[in-house]
Image: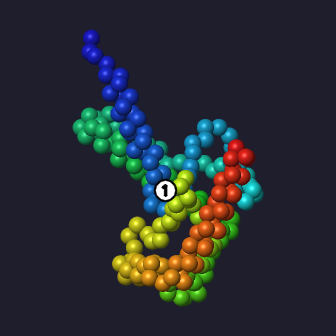
């Protein structure tokens, strides 16, 4: 009788599941959206920090049928499985990105129209003003990502130059500190309200 390596199988299975379920949308920005696994139901409700909520029906997302040929698995091993699942995951990611885009278009979010102005520290303050900022337990601001995964190098330099102005110009620093202080209080109020709701 051959030994059965149950612990090894369990670890391999957990590793595969984690790899396949990470970054579901295959997108650096959308992967930051908080999510959870829902096992039942045909609708979901989004509860916002301002107390409003929206209930939506779920939409089915699926890929083309995946088939595995035993001979190919014997010849090429697990790569066959991963390649097939990756193709399916890519198809679902495309559908997921489309759904998120549609939802964002339905639900208006705060926007800042730069009106063709170049990026400046002042424009950055306007953008922060329109956002709900996040802070850690110590009250330290979690600064949002400013650029894409592969930013335009010239734009990246300009952003760095403009944000460095907060260190050099006391008036700008004062405006930023004042904004952060107010946003920190708003964040704390939201968190306190959320704890009461839970």
Q: Nearer the viewer, residue 49 or 153?
A: 49
Which residue in the structure is indicated by mark 1? 31
Numbered-mark total:
1
Q: Please, which colouring scheme is shown?
A: rainbow
Crowd band around label 1 with a 10 angstrom C-alpha radius: few (<14), some (14–19), many (20+): few
User: In the rendered image of this protein, does residue 67 appear above or below residue 1?
Assistant: below
Give coordinates of residue 56: x percent, y percent. 71, 52
- In the displayed image of the protein, which residue is found farthest to the right? 52
Give coordinates of residue 115: x percent, y percent. 59, 87
In the visual, does 89 lie left or right of 128? left
User: In the rendered image of this protein, does residue 45 appear above or below residue 104?
Assistant: above
- Specify whether residue 90 is in view: yes
Helix, strand, or loop for circle 1?
helix
User: In the rendered image of this protein, does residue 117 appear above or below residue 40?
Assistant: below
Q: Dividing the image into 4 quarters, which one contains the C terminus?
A: top right
- Specify whether residue 46 is in view: no
Q: Nearer the viewer, residue 32 or 44?
A: 32
Q: Nearer the viewer, residue 52 or 195?
A: 195
Residue placed at 44% from the left, 82% from the top?
168
In the visual, does 96 lie left or right of 168? right
In the visual, does 78 lie left or right of 142? left
Give coordinates of residue 83: x percent, y percent. 35, 47
Figure quadrant of residue 153: bottom left
Q: Dividing the image into 4 quarters, which one contains the N terminus?
A: top left
Residue placed at 59% from the left, 59% from the top?
99
Residue placed at 53% from the left, 63% from the top?
141
- In the displayed image of the protein, which residue is found farthest to the left? 75
In the visual, does 144 lie left or right of 188? left
């Amino acid at each position: 009788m051959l030994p059965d390596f149950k612990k090894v199988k369990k670890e391999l299975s957990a590793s595969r599941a984690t790899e396949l379920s990470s970054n579901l949308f295959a997108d650096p920005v959308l992967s930051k959206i908080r999510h959870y696994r829902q096992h039942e139901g045909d609708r979901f409700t989004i509860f916002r920090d301002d107390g409003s909520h929206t209930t939506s029906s779920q939409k089915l997302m699926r890929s083309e049928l995946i088939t595995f040929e035993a001979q190919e698995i014997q010849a090429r091993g697990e790569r066959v499985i991963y390649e097939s699942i990756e193709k399916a995951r890519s198809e679902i990611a495309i559908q997921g990105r489309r759904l998120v885009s549609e939802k964002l278009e339905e639900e208006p979010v705060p926007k800042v129209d730069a009106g063709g102005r170049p990026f400046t520290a002042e424009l950055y303050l306007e953008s922060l003003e329109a956002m709900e900022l996040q802070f850690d337990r110590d009250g330290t601001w979690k600064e949002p990502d400013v650029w894409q995964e592969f930013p335009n190098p010239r734009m990246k330099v300009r952003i760095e130059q403009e944000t460095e102005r907060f260190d050099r110009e006391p008036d700008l620093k004062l405006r930023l500190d004042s904004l952060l202080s107010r946003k920190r209080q708003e964040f704390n109020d939201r968190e306190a309200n959320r704890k009461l709701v839970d």
